[in-house]
Image (cartoon, coloured by chain):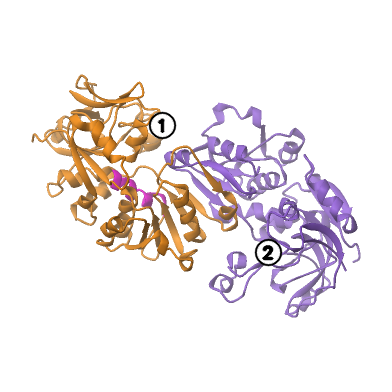
Chain colours: A purple, B orange
Amino acid sequence: MKALRFEDDTLRLSEVAVPGRAGEALVRVRVAGICNTDLEIARGYAGFQGTLGHEFVGVVESAPGDASLEGKRVVGEINAGCGLCELCRAGDPRHCPRRTVLGIVGRDGAFAEYLQLPTSNLLPVPDEVSDERAVFTEPLAAACGITERLHVDEATRVAVVGDGKLGLLCAQALKAMTGARVTLVGKHQSKLDIAARRGVETLTVEETARSLERSFDLCVEASGSERGFETALKLLRARGTLVLKSTFHGATRFNAAPVVVDEISIVGSRCGRFAPALELLAKDAVEVEDMIHADFPLAEGVRALEHAASAGVLKVLLRVSSEQ
Amino acid sequence: MKALRFEDDTLRLSEVAVPGRAGEALVRVRVAGICNTDLEIARGYAGFQGTLGHEFVGVVESAPGDASLEGKRVVGEINAGCGLCELCRAGDPRHCPRRTVLGIVGRDGAFAEYLQLPTSNLLPVPDEVSDERAVFTEPLAAACGITERLHVDEATRVAVVGDGKLGLLCAQALKAMTGARVTLVGKHQSKLDIAARRGVETLTVEETARSLERSFDLCVEASGSERGFETALKLLRARGTLVLKSTFHGATRFNAAPVVVDEISIVGSRCGRFAPALELLAKDAVEVEDMIHADFPLAEGVRALEHAASAGVLKVLLRVSSEQ
């Protein structure tokens, strides 16, 4: 089968065997999404070698342990745990120290004709959710995951800094899940408008006047830049919480003094559960199609990643298979 | 009266008028303690001009609103709020945006024969607590304040990184208040021994073997160094909490990736309430006298601060008045 792989410091389309690990489900990939993490991997920053990709929707070819899934359209949670440690036994492999992560750590990913995951990682996609929407389940789940890490409700004044893919999803997810008043701070009016259509207030960075400083209970840093981190800190009230969603490459400069003086909490947040994200997609509570800026066939995957890395481009999809 | 003041980029002993603001208590200072924050101010890093000092024990000369305090030996909470904002009305001026802070922000401090504070900031010192112990109330309260910011109990595995004054107090306070198993990580056996006498486990940085990495629920960064910050992050389990107690001067380098991947929380913590600290001192639950490395009369305050800045020196006291 075809697979877009990063090996020997090079991203290339390769011909490899269909994976055949016993005990795991086999999924034929229909559509996959390119995430900034894929771009980091392709730059050699993440130490991963193998098939890229962790955002996908596909059709189950075989699913040991749950035959009812076979032939179903599914998405899949990306962390596969050891199954034996305390965390895995509690049903949450996301921090299993021996976990593999689809297309990120020790496990071939979704930019291929087929992928494997444990059967228990798969969730059927409701018929009303198109492939183009379902492929957003993973990043939307990451956005929803903020509510697993801290309490947010309609009284929480939220700012999301960064109007890229992650910021747009975080702002919409927090608004839709909690009813909080959410403000998205970004640089691009056309991107801000996507969230505005779903009731998110928006501000360009220039409009983030001094009057707004120290007025938010919760800020989500989703820009991946030092400047965004500083902006988020400035917007927070004393004892506010800064959620760190994006992993900047390498070290950033960080001034500890205001964090101590204003008793700020900084909360890291990575993967979320898929079920709440699928629910938001099923009830059309978030805008995702408008974030799709291009699609490419898998065979043009190298070019697709180059395009995804261009300034201003939001989601780029890979079309892998259209068979039913 | 004599006062040790930082003005025009210079620390000097000055002759100034006894303060006489109406509506505030007047306290004759007996003993004051030198904190690293004072050293930062004297280096010009903190933007404060005026009389230094925020750790003290003294005797009340006058206390508008509570005559029962007059003649009593007291300590005093250092934040004085506007009295009008929501925070102040809720009884907690520590984050009042218009607050002054004794010897730190907009208010002359304790390295003087007399100081003023709102009467409501003062707490009588129980007879069984000597001046030499009472003067530790403020920094000990800051250590106790960690428990205001997050839940700690006997099941919490705690590491405190840094065996300076702050680390010694944090380790002992957390042990005494919560019964948690607390490990102090430092570089100096003689300092570690102070906490060890109160049931704190101790490790030198060299002994912090790889086997201990990722094994603590809570780490307190009390070293004020980038290296300490990194050590604390390494010791934390996934979804653990790092408490930031010390404000390093300027920016530190900070790698956001592990905070996001391991979903770490970083919690800033500044001032704590005095009552729990006085209680720990009254029941002799913490070792503080052994942290006193020198004392100087106020008249030798400049030399005292120089000494306090020397490597390896723990608490330096200023003796201001011994009148009853």
Q: Would residue B153 be found to the left or right of residue A20 on screen? A: left
Vertical side of A226 occupied by B20: above or below: above
Label 1: chain letter: B
Please say whether residue B146 is one of the residues in the magenta stretch: yes
Name the residue rendered at 56%, 71% in the picture.
Answer: A90
Q: Mark 1 near mark 2, Cβ–Cβ under 8 Å?
A: no
Q: CA distance from mark 1 to mark 2?
A: 44 Å
Q: Would residue B323 be found to the left or right of residue A279 on screen? A: left
Tag 2: amino acid: Val
* Res. B300 in view: yes
Tag 1: amino acid: Tyr
The main secondary structure of the magenta stretch is helix
Residue A257, given in percent of the width and then of the height, sits at 45, 39
Q: Residues within 10 Å of mark 1 (few under 14, many from 20)?
A: some
Please say whether residue B147 is one of the residues in the magenta stretch: yes
Q: Secondary structure at mark 1?
A: loop
Name the residue rendered at 53%, 42% in the picture.
Answer: A254
Q: Residues within 10 Å of mark 2 (few under 14, many from 20)?
A: many
Tell which residue pokes out farthest to the front in this image.
B311
The segment highlighted magenta reads B139-150
Q: A14 or A27: nearer the eye? A: A14
Residue A298, given in percent of the width and then of the height, sits at 87, 58
Residue A241, given in percent of the width and then of the height, sits at 52, 45
For mark 2, what is the residue?
A105
For mark 1, what is the residue?
B45
